[in-house]
Image (cartoon, rainbow, N blue to C red):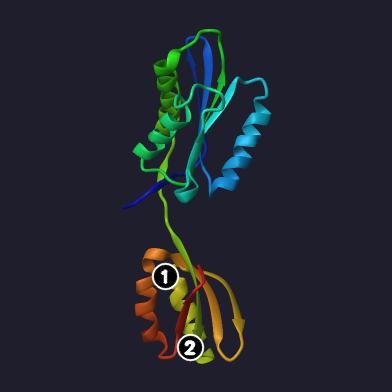
Amino acid sequence: MATFTLAQRVEIELEIRKSRFIGIVMPVPGREAAMQEIARMRDAHRSATHVCWALMAGGQSGMSDDGEPSGTAGRPMLEVLRHHELDGVLAMVVRYFGGVKLGAGGLVRAYTDAIASALKQAQRIERIAWAEVEIAIAYADESQLRYWLQQKHYALLGSRHDTLARLHVRLPATELPQLAGGLPRLSSNAAITQIM
């Protein structure tokens, strides 16, 4: 099943019964980067009442109601991200309280609407899982392999040379079988070692 991330950060603003809600969605590589972004938002909005967030990042997913009643902010935002099949995405809502209480249902709607509105303006892109491999090959076959890798648009990250030429390559994980199938045509002694 394909998962998606976002092409860029999107920020929107809603006013709901005198409260100001700033909704932000953005791509992030993982939890550490997300925590840095949340800290930046807290810094930028020191007088905000709440900075709630939800993160979809594989096994590093999480959420925070940041003082709102439990289950009224983080979870609804996380559900919006799930509904859009997003991964590697941070959603944040900065709330400036306007004096009118919204109640639990009103809060859920407000936080859901803020993220849904931001996502309407965001470009979704397919999230690609990458693999890194080392290909060991005889020196005589190295230039032919380099040419083949270039034709496939695989990224050559580095190389080293000892008894064999060893090329460090990054490619979409789904293309590992194609790589393994194509190598024997280039060289009978090529070997692939997966790095990550």
Q: Disc number at residue 141? A: 2
Judging depth in this view, the residue of 107 and 29 nearest the camera is 107
Compared with 73, 172 (above or below) is: below
Judging depth in this view, the residue of 132 and 63 nearest the camera is 63
Three-letter amino acid code of the residue under disc 1? Lys
Q: Disc number at residue 78? A: none
Q: Is residue 5 left or right of 139 when viewed as pictured? A: left
Residue 24, percent from left and from top:
52, 31
Compared with 101, 67 (above or below) is: below
Three-letter amino acid code of the residue under disc 2? Asp
SS state under label 2: helix
* Label 2 crowd (10 A; few <14 / some 14-19 / many >=20): some
* Label 1 crowd (10 A; few <14 / some 14-19 / many >=20): few
Q: Is residue 91 visible?
A: no
Q: What's the residue at 60%, 41% (across, down)?
A: 35
Compared with 123, 42 (above or below) is: above
SS state under label 1: helix
Compared with 138, 193 (above or below) is: above
Residue 194, percent from left and from top:
48, 73
Q: What's the residue at 54%, 17% (across, down)?
A: 20
Residue furthest front as drawn: 70
Q: What's the residue at 44%, 13% (across, down)?
A: 103
- Mark 1 lies on residue: 152
